[in-house]
Amino acid sequence: MGEEQGLRQTQLLDTMFVRGLKRKCFDGEEDIEGTLAGFKAIPSYNLQRQSLLDMSLVKLQLCHMLVEPNLCRSVLIANTVRQIQEEMTQDGTWQMINTHSAGQTSLDRLISTDILCRSSKEQAEGKLVPVYSTFAKDCEGTQSQDNSEMISAVTSAQAPRNLQSNMWEMENPQENRGNFQKSLDQIFETLENKSPNSVEDLFSEVDNSYYDLDTVLTGMMSNTKMGHCDVLETFPSQTTTNSNSNCKSDLNELDHIVEILVES
Amino acid sequence: MAGAGAGGNDIQWCFSQVKGAVDDDVAEADIISTVEFNHSGELLATGDKGGRVVIFQQEQENKTQSHSRGEYNVYSTFQSHEPEFDYLKSLEIEEKINKIRWLPQKNAAQFLLSTNDKTIKLWKISERDKRPEGYNLKEEDGRYRDPTTVTTLRVPVFRPMDLMVEASPRRIFANAHTYHINSISINSDYETYLSADDLRINLWHLEITDRSFNIVDIKPANMEELTEVITAAEFHPNSCNTFVYSSSKGTIRLCDMRASALCDRHTKLFEEPEDPSNRSFFSEIISSISDVKFSHSGRYMMTRDYLSVKIWDLNMENRPVETYQVHEYLRSKLCSLYENDCIFDKFECCWNGSDSVVMTGSYNNFFRMFDRNTKRDITLEASRENNKPRTILKPRKVCASGKRKKDEISVDSLDFNKKILHTAWHPKENIIAVATTNNLYIFQDKVN
C-alpha cells in the first residue's frame, strides 16, 4: 500500500468509522455510497476494513525489534485484527488467499524470532507450551497447517525457570542429554514442513533455543544472536557442520558435544 | 484550595519555572518518563528515558517575597538504571525510568523507589554538610603523613562544608518480572509495596530483595489466548489489604489480600457498560485504562482512558460517578491516531491535595483540569511562550469543527508529537509539575 494511498484511505477511514456505522446491516455497497453523498470515489466499507486489517498486520510484524515489544499494544492490535476477522467471517468476505500469504510471511517471522525451546520439566512431560503467536493461528484459517499447532515455545516467563531447572538437573547429565535430544526433536518436527535447504538454514532459525541450553551448559554468553552453527564452531574441533549431512547425524554430534561439556 | 478561591473565583495559574533544554532537538535520553512529588511536596523527582533521576527541592519561602512560593532547584541527580542486555532472549532492557514513588520520611534521609521495565531500586538520598578535619595521620587532601613527622596529637573535629547530596542504592529488587513493569505502589503500612507488570503483580517487603510474593497472575496457560493485560495498579491509601489494578479492556479490579494468597478473584469489578452508539473497531483500544489513582481520602478512584477521565466511587461498581471528556474531538480521528500509534499513548492523571480538582494531559502540550465541585474545566498550555514568572496562563480552546474562532486551534493543526503524559500536583499547595517531552514546567496559582 503506497504511502499516499494509505494516507488517503486512512483519512477516509476516519470518516467511515464513526458511530454506529459498523453495526449496520448492509444490503450492498450502494447503500453506503448513497449515505455518503458528496464524497467522490469512496472506497467501500469492505475495502476500508481490509485496509485497517492490513495496517494492523503490518503493525504486528513491526513489533519484533531490538527491545521487547510492548505487550499491551500487541494485544490490543491483535484483538482488533480478531474483531475484523470475525466480522469478515460473518459477512462471508473472508478471503483465504489474501490472508494466507500474509499469514505465511508473518509465520516465518514468528518462527525466526521466537524462542523455540521448552523447559526441561515440560519436555519430560511432553507438554507443548505455545508462544503468544498473535494471529498465526487465525491466519491459517481452515487450512490448519501442522506448523501452527506444533509451534512449541516457552514464553519469556519460562526462561528464568529454564535456567534454574536446567542447572538443577545438571546432576543427571544422562537425563539432561535426553531432554536436549527431545527438544531438538520437537524443533525439527516443527520445522519439517519448511524443508530447509541446508542444515544451517534450519539451525539459524532456532538459535534462541540453543541459546538457553548452551548458556547453561557452557556458561557461555554472547551479545550477538548466534546461529547454532556459530555456536558449534566455537567448540574445539569436534564439530564439522557439513551442510550436506542430514539432521540425524548432526544430532548425534551435538549429543556427543554435550556429553563432553557436561562431563568436563 | 484549588477551584474555589476567595469570592468563588476560579484559580488562576501562573508560570513559575521551566527545567530542561531549550532547543527543539530532543535528545532521546532526556525524554521525561515520570514525575512525582514527595509526601511533603518539598521534593519533586523526575525520571527520564536515559535512566536518570533528577530531584528538585523547593527553597525555603522568602519572607520578603511573599507573592511567590519557593522555587524548585536541582537537589540531586543520579543514574538510577543502566541499559542491560537479556542474553537469553537477545533483547535489550531499557533503562527508562517507568515510575518513581517516594517513601514517607522517617529520618533525615529521603527514600524513593524507582523502576525500569525489570528492576526496582530503593534509593537513599542523604545530605552531608559537615566533614571531619584534623586527622593525625592524614593530610587534608588525603595523603598519608609520614608518622615520624607527627609530634603532637589532636582530636579531629567536624567542620561545616558545602552541602553535598548523595544518592545510594540501598536495595535492588530484581528478577521477579518477566514482563514489563508498569506500576509500583507503596502500601500504607510503609513496609511493603507492589510491582505490576503486564500479566502479574508481586508483593515485596522493602527489606527483603530475594523474595517476592505473586498476588495476581492473569497469564493464560495458552499464551495464544491472551486478550487482556494489566495496565496499572495501586494500593489503597488507607487500607493496607486493598489494592486495585486496571486492564486493557477498561476494567478495574479491587482485591483484598486477606481473601486469599493469590488474588485472582477480585473482590469488586468496576466496569462501565459500553455505549452501543459509539461502537467501532477502536472501542476496545480507547477503553484501555492507562492510569488509575486513588483519591487522597480513599473513597474514590480515578481512571484515565484514551478520551476521558472517570471518577469511581468504591461503593459502586457498575458505572463511574463522574466522567470528564479530555479531548472528545479526537473521536473522529481515531483511525489516523491508530495509524501513527498515538492511540496507544498512556496518559496519566492526578488529584489535587483536597481531591476537588483532577488533572491530566493531552496533545499539543495542552493539559486539562476538571473541578469536581463547580463542574468547570480548563485547558492550559505548557509552552515557553509564556515563560515570564507570574504570567497568568491563558485558557486554550480546541475547535472541533466548523468556524474557528479567534485564538482557537483547529484539531488538524494540533501537534501530536507534543504530548503531556505525566503531570503531578503538590500534595498540599496549588503547585503543579507538567512534563512535556523533555521539559518540566512548574506552575503555581496566583498569590496576591
Image (tube, coloured by chain):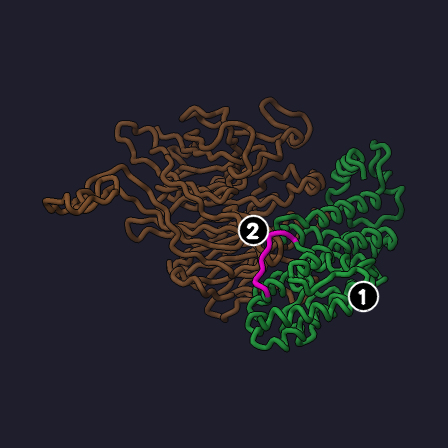
Chain colours: A green, B brown
Q: Nearer the viewer, residue B441 or A32?
A: B441
Q: Which residue is mark 1?
A: A246
Q: Quadrant of residue A230?
A: bottom right
Seen as rendered, the residue at the extreme top is B406
Identify the main secondary structure in magenta. Answer: loop
- The residue that label 2 is drawn on is B93
Amino acid at pointer 1: Asn
> x and y percent of residue B339 in the render?
71, 41
Q: Position of residue B439 (x, y in %)?
A: 49, 34
Dot 2 and dot 1 residues touching (CB under 8 Å) = no
Q: Is residue B180 visible?
A: yes
Query: Quick check: can you spot residue B226?
Result: no
Seen at 87% across and 53% down, the residue is A95
Q: Chain of mark 2?
A: B
- Magenta residue check for B285: no
In depth, the one of B134 and B47 nearer the eye is B134
The boundaries of the magenta stretch are: A218-225
State how far apart marks 2 and 1 are (Cα): 38 Å
Few, some or many residues within 10 Å of mark 2 (<14, 14–19, 20+): some
